[in-house]
Amino acid sequence: MELDRRLLLAHCAVHALSIAAGLLVVVPMALNGSAFKGRCALFTTGYWRTDSRAEAPEQPGDVSQLLVQQWGPLATCQFATFVGIFSVLYGAAQGWRCLFYLHGRHDDTLFSSFLTVLLSVCVLFLSGGASVLLSLGLASWCDTVTDYNTRPFSCAESQSVPLYLDVDTSSFYTELNLAQVSLWGVTALWLAQSILAFLRLYHSHRQHISGPCLPREKEFLLGHSPSESGSSPSPPHPPVTPTILV
């Protein structure tokens, strides 16, 4: 198996994993957005308030509820979702191209390989930024929900605690945590794609340089130059002596 074929197989595997990881980002974020009625839980600020409900016989004692001061910026959730969608679409397109190249036994051109490296590096930084934003946003939301760890429950356990919000919070931690882990996986896969794309560019560059030199090397090994093999010198003609007629 040649080197370019191994690189193509590895790139196909990474693209397939990118599709799966991208779906694991898009689906939980879509479910969370639907449960929160289009709002973004990331970087949401609020505080807990305790109300006295002793007059209500069905709910005696004090009841604590979470009051949201400001919901998180919607662009943060949309950015993470965009990276997941792009990973799915790009992975599907490039995976099909890799299978096509494996069937045709050829690879990208030098210019196309350079564009692939450039795009992979750019999306690597985008996915890394989205991962950092999602992790920080989830940590901020967990601080709000647990009142900076002063509540008797953790962020994961707060799913089963009534927060008395007008949104469904029964599975927010599972959805956002799954999206966070998957998005970091997408970032790692984009790093692998960048490395593989660079190796394919290097391999194409070597083939581009060594391609025109192969005929010259063959001529050198045969012991004659192309100018010598093209035409052989003709033997010199004998001098012509003038003849005098009498």
Image (cartoon, rainbow, N blue to C red):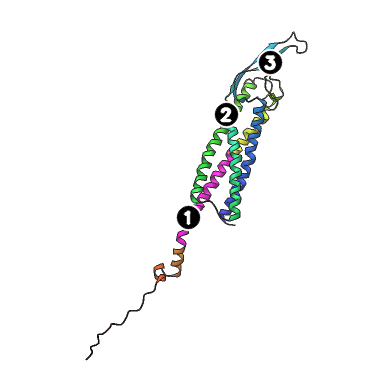
Name the residue carrying label 1: 208
**Amino acid beneath label 3:** Ser
Q: Give me the residue at 44% from left, 67% from top.
A: 219
**How far apart in space, not on screen, are marks 3 and 1 (Cα)?**
70 Å
Task: Tell us which disc is closer to us: 3 or 2.
Answer: 2
> Which residues, given as a range, are shown in magenta?
187-214
- Using the image, tell me which numbered label, if any, was put on residue 64: 3
Task: Tell us which disc is closer to us: 3 or 1.
Answer: 1
Residue that protrudes farthest toward the top in the picture? 55
**Rendered-image quadrant of the C terminus:** bottom left
Of labels 1 and 2, earlier in sequence is 2
Residue 18 figure quarter: top right
Query: Is 81 placed left or right of 213 in the picture?
Result: right
Q: Position of residue 34 (x, y in %)?
A: 66, 27
Of labels 3 and 1, earlier in sequence is 3
**Rendered-image quadrant of the N terminus:** bottom right
**Amino acid beneath label 1:** His
Name the residue carrying label 2: 76
Q: Position of residue 107 (x, y in %)?
A: 55, 53
